[in-house]
């Protein structure tokens, strides 16, 4: 049976009717998010069949290919299971909510995560579970000695900027002998994290410890077998102060894994990334710059792991 490739992707040709084109792009993003959300509890094929008009939008934007009359999503969005579909939907929904907040002028450029509502924090946090699964399933097995370290009773993982502790819980589930310490500067988000862990009610949740702390004040020495750092969420000054402290917190031979943004491939995405980072109190580091920075601090065996298309690149390096 022949497979028709996706139709040409929507071009942001703004010469004719720019407002209409931009609005259509926003609705196409909404169609993708809703489809991924539905695919968390059913198959993607059923999600596409359930709403033909929504699927027509995805086809018009070039995100559908057909095998005969059967539509399927672009390969970039064919996730292996329901939780991954849910994480992908929540990450995109969080970004879309922030774009709406920006359009409404709900906060100035000096704002950040403290100005976001609980629902945005929950969506962003739950999306991070997908990154946790990528760390556990792809990154850790590829890093020399790390899986063995995390299989030792009492091994320790530090989750910087733990948010609602979704990533911390995912790592605790993946490594049942490890203790996970989650730190965050926001007491409000830690309250949400405590609610999430209590709702989980599992042995893994009992191995997650939450601390109200700023990463720039970290003083632990040689304490962790792995450190997770979501770099885009730190201001550049904070990141500069935090990195040497986090490296000192690693045990000899232990690994730091840093979430970074991929290099933006075009001027529009470069500009959006810069605006988004400033609004959320973040920084302009991408994967290449982070790799060079870790090497400059004397770390070894640096590796980069792409995740989903357009998603974070996980950069790992080992303390000597």
Image: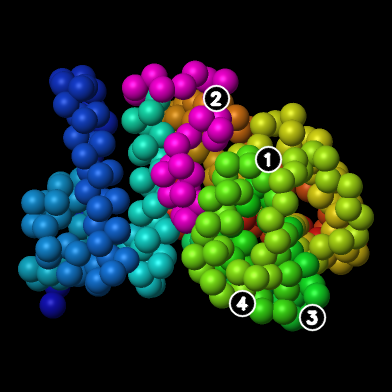
Label 3 sits on a secondary structure element that is loop
Q: Quadrant of the C terminus?
A: bottom right
- Between the C-alphas of marks 4 and 1, the distance is 25 Å
Q: Nearer the viewer, residue 146 or 263?
A: 146
| Labels 3, 4: front one | 4
Q: Look at the numbered discs 1 and 2 and tell me whether their residues touch, using CB distance below 8 Å.
A: no
Q: Is residue 150 left or right of residue 137?
A: right
Using the rendered view, name the quadrant where residue 41 is placed.
Answer: bottom left
Q: Look at the numbered discs 4 and 2 and tell me whether their residues touch, using CB distance below 8 Å.
A: no
Q: Is residue 187 left or right of residue 157?
A: left
Residue 53 position, x and y percent, is 8, 51
| Labels 3, 1: front one | 1
Residue 99, compared with residue 219, is above or below; it is above
| Labels 4, 2: front one | 4
Residue 284 position, x and y percent, is 61, 32
Please provide the residue range marked out in magenta: 103-128
Q: Quadrant of the N terminus?
A: bottom left
Query: Mark 4 or mark 1, which has the lower sequence index?
Result: 1
Query: Mark 3 or mark 4, which has the lower sequence index?
Result: 3
Q: Look at the numbered discs 4 and 1 and tell me whether their residues touch, using CB distance below 8 Å.
A: no
Q: Is residue 121 magenta?
A: yes
Label 2 sits on a secondary structure element that is loop
Query: Mark 3 or mark 1, which has the lower sequence index?
Result: 3
Residue annotated with mark 3: 152
Residue 20 seen by the camera: yes
Residue annotated with mark 2: 111
Residue 210 position, x and y percent, is 69, 56
Residue annotated with mark 4: 203
| Labels 1, 2: front one | 1
Residue annotated with mark 1: 185
């Amino acid at each position: 049976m022949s497979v028709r490739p996706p139709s040409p992707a929507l071009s942001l040709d703004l010469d004719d009717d720019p407002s209409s084109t931009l609005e259509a792009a926003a609705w196409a993003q909404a169609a993708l998010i809703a489809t991924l959300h539905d695919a968390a509890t059913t198959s993607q094929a059923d999600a596409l069949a359930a709403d033909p008009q929504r699927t027509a939008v995805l086809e018009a934007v070039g995100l559908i290919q057909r095998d005969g009359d059967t539509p399927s999503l672009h390969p970039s969005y064919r996730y292996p299971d329901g939780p991954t579909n849910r994480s992908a939907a929540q990450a995109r929904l969080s970004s879309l909510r922030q774009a709406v907040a920006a359009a409404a002028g709900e906060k100035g450029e000096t704002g950040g995560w403290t100005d976001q509502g609980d629902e945005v924090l929950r969506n962003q946090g739950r999306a991070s579970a997908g990154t946790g699964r990528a760390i556990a399933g792809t990154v850790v097995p590829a890093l020399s000695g790390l899986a063995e370290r995390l299989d030792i009773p009492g091994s320790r993982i530090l989750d910087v900027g733990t948010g609602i502790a979704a990533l911390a819980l995912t790592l605790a589930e993946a490594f049942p002998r490890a203790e996970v310490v989650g730190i965050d500067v926001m007491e409000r988000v830690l309250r949400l994290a405590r609610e999430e862990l209590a709702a989980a009610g599992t042995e893994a949740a009992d191995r997650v410890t939450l601390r109200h702390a700023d990463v720039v004040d970290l003083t632990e020495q040689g304490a962790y077998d792995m450190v997770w750092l979501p770099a885009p969420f730190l201001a550049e000054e904070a990141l500069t102060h935090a990195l040497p402290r986090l490296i000192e917190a690693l045990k000899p031979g232990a690994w730091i894994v840093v979430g970074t943004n991929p290099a933006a491939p075009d001027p529009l995405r470069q500009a959006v990334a810069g605006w988004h980072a400033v609004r959320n109190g973040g920084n302009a580091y991408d994967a290449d710059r982070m790799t060079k920075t870790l090497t400059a601090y004397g770390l070894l065996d640096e590796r980069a792991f792409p995740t989903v298309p357009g998603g974070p690149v996980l950069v790992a390096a080992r303390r000597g």
